Amino acid sequence: MTVLAAQGVSVAFGTRQVLHDVSLDVKPGELVALQGPSGSGKSCLLAVCAGLQAPDSGAVTLDDEPVRLRDAAQRRRVGLLLQGLGLLPLLTATENVEIPLQVADEALPPADVVDRAATALARVELADRADRLVEELSGGQRQRVALARALVARPEVVLVDEPSSALDGHLRDLVFRLLREEADRGAAVLVATHDPSIADWSHRVLLLHDGELTQG
């Protein structure tokens, strides 16, 4: 069964063709890596899959239902980390991570929200920064807070863009291991990254070049 699928997706910005007839699918329990040089269209493809960007042609489906632009109900099923991170700098790391739990379809008791946010930050090795304002954190720490926020609600689909760009060594491997754990629990995970070591953690690698997709 496929959770996330794109069929014939094309996107152009003015005269520049960013994506050209791209098709892919991601199944439950699968981590798919999307690789390609800067400007190849990886971030655009993730935005289309997340319902943040409408394709010029083609379609994206979530459980065979068309992905609708900025649909809140669909959005709650997706854990998303884009390169801009989207953190609120004047909130603490914990408060940022709690946001997906506070808008979930099923309301959680406040104590559960606190516990799950704490667990998510511990997974990314930031338990000791939980009460720090995001604006006080380093770039790599912010990236890990954003990953914790993307994963805290245990989403069905995980879409992440360059999750290790500000990290190296142990922390890079930590991030890829956590994404593989999400796939192992049954999520459909799509990761866009320049890092070739993602192949060691992935079930499949797809290559995007000049907006066209090939198998790795």
Image: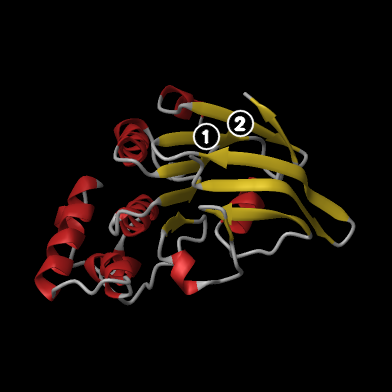
Q: Position of residue 199 (x, y in %)?
A: 48, 25
Q: For the C terminus, which image quadrant?
A: top right
Classify residue 19 as left or right of residue 141: right
Q: Nearer the viewer, residue 167 or 201?
A: 201
Q: Secondary structure at mark 1?
A: strand
Q: CA distance from mark 2 to mark 1?
A: 6 Å
- Indicate the amino acid at tag 2: Leu
- Indicate the amino acid at tag 1: Ala
Are circles 2 and 1 on residues that touch, CB within 8 Å? Answer: yes
Q: Is residue 90 above or below residue 121?
A: below
Q: Is residue 41 above or below residue 116?
A: above
- Label 2 neighbour load within 10 Å: few <14, some 14-19, many 20+: some
Q: Position of residue 77 (x, y in %)?
A: 41, 60
What residue sits 45% from the left and 70% below the top? Answer: 73
Classify residue 55 as left or right of residue 161: right
Colouring scheme, one of rainbow, by chain, secondary structure, one colour = secondary structure
Q: Position of residue 22 (x, y in %)?
A: 72, 43
What residue sits 14% from the left and 55% below the top? Answer: 128
What residue sits 22% from the left and 54% below the top? Answer: 121
Q: Position of residue 183 (x, y in %)?
A: 36, 38
Determine which residue is flagged by label 2.
206
Q: Is residue 176 above or below residue 203?
A: below
Determine which residue is flagged by label 1.
33
Q: Earlier in the sequence, mark 2 or mark 1?
A: 1
